[in-house]
Amino acid sequence: MKKALIPLILFAVLVVFLGIGLNRDPHEIPSPLIGKPAPLFTAPRLQAPDQLFSSKDMLGKVWLLNTWASWCVACRQEHPILMEFAKTKALPIIGLDYKDQNADGLKWLARHGDPYDLSVTDKDGRIGIDFGVYGVPESFLIDKAGIIRYKQIGPITDEALRDKIMPLVRELQK
């Protein structure tokens, strides 16, 4: 009789875990990098490949690193929001063109607009791997000391800007 209860108990445990998983927001995947120094990188600028950008250049500033690509469907959803947000000049936005060809990235920005203060290329995805990018778009809010304070998985929404990102930006800029 006791052996017959084991599958029932295991099934009940699985149902509980499934219920917990279904009630979680997929954009709220915890990142082990939150509260830790952002990975340092140096990469060529998309618009001027002979010029390099280093994340060290942003020390002393609160900034947003936004991963995107010309082949990314969700990036099209996020892009108009980034375009409007860039007009506020609330903080520098650095684009990371992830696993993309330079010509494709440049065409995409020319067609849809360029919200970035500058974009860098990450053709082999190494920078994205260092940041723990699961897929594009993903964004990282980095403080003046170079510490990652927030990670947005998936497209930035108006709600994320209003309720999470901007309150944190205001706090970090004090």
Image: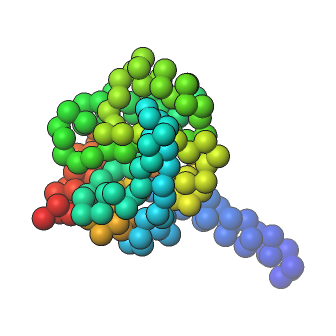
Q: Residue furthest bottom?
A: 2
Q: Name the image colouring.
A: rainbow
Give left or right: position of 95 versus 128.
left
Q: Residue at x 43, y 32 (%)?
A: 47
Q: Residue furthest left?
A: 174
Quadrant of the rendering where the N terminus is positioned? bottom right
Quadrant of the rendering where the C terminus is positioned? bottom left
Q: Residue at x 51, y 29 (%)?
A: 105
On screen, 151 above or below 76?
A: below
Q: Residue at x 83, y 82 (%)?
A: 2
Give left or right: position of 54 versus 136.
left
- Residue sitting nearer the eye, 105 or 26: 105
Q: Position of residue 55 (x, y in %)?
A: 40, 57
Q: How many marks?
A: 0
Q: Residue at x 30, y 53 (%)?
A: 63
Q: Quadrant of residue 89?
A: top left
On screen, 143 above or below 157?
A: below
On screen, 90 above or below 29?
A: above
Q: Position of residue 113 (x, y in %)?
A: 35, 23
Q: Quadrant of residue 143?
A: bottom left
Instruction: Let me know if residue 102 appears in the view.
Output: yes
Give left or right: position of 170 versus 13.
left
Instruction: Let me know if residue 154 appears in the view.
Output: no
Give left or right: position of 47 versus 134.
left
